[in-house]
Structure formats: C-alpha cells, structure tokens
Amino acid sequence: MRRYEVVFILRPDLDEEKNTAVIDKFSDLIVNQGGEITKLDRWGKRRLAYEVKDYREGFYVVLHINAESKVSSELDRVFKITDEVLRHIIIREEE
C-alpha cells in the first residue's frame, strides 16, 4: 500500500450537515475500496488565493490515507463529478 495526502475544497455555502455527508462519502469510498484513513483534518473555511467558480472562500479538508493506486484513481474520478468539490489534489507521499 502507498501513502497519499488528499486535499479537497468544498463549496462554502454548504451547511455543516452537508459538509459531513460529503466527507463521509469520500471516507466510505476509500474504506470500501480497501484503503485506510490514518488522519482526517477539517481546516474549515479559508479564503482562496483566487476566485474559483464565483467563490472567494472554501471549506478545506485534508486526508492522509494508505491505499493502492486504484483507490486514488477512483477517488480522483469521483472528485471530478461531485458538484460540492471546488478543487482537489492527491499527492503520493514518499516512503
């Protein structure tokens, strides 16, 4: 298994319940694909460096996971089709 750091930014106009639902959706996806979440950080609302889809701020979430490469590919695919996600990045950490 490889270690990854996953950072994604959610729309700031979502309520706390919807934020939790989206985060749980991605957490469940990772676990159901055979991955493991080692750390979950909710940074909260932060100002963006530039405007993204007419938003000036976003809700940041950072995940540290252990997973196979197929999990990161599936995670990337689902990030791209989820309307609540403004931006995302998946970084493979060195061993």
Image: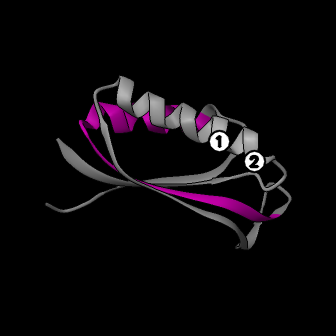
Q: Is residue 12 visible?
A: yes
* Residue 67 highlighted magenta (yes or no): yes
Q: Quadrant of residue 64?
A: bottom left
Between residue 54 and residue 68, name the one nearer to us: 68
Q: Is residue 84 visible?
A: no
Q: Secondary structure at mark 2?
A: helix
Q: Residue at x 65, y 42 (%)?
A: 20
Identify whether 45 is placed above or below 66: below
Residue type at mark 1? Answer: Thr
Point out which mark residue 16 bears: 2
Residue extending furthest toward the left: 95
User: Which residue bears the numbered disc 1?
Assistant: 20
Picture coordinates of residue 44, whole percent (x, y): 66, 64
Q: Which residues are magenta?
A: 56-80
Task: Locate the C terminus by quadrant.
Answer: bottom left
Q: Are marks 1 and 2 in contact (CB under 8 Å)?
A: yes
Q: Residue at x 30, y 31 (%)?
A: 70
Residue extending furthest toward the front: 17
| CA distance separating discs 1 and 2 | 6 Å
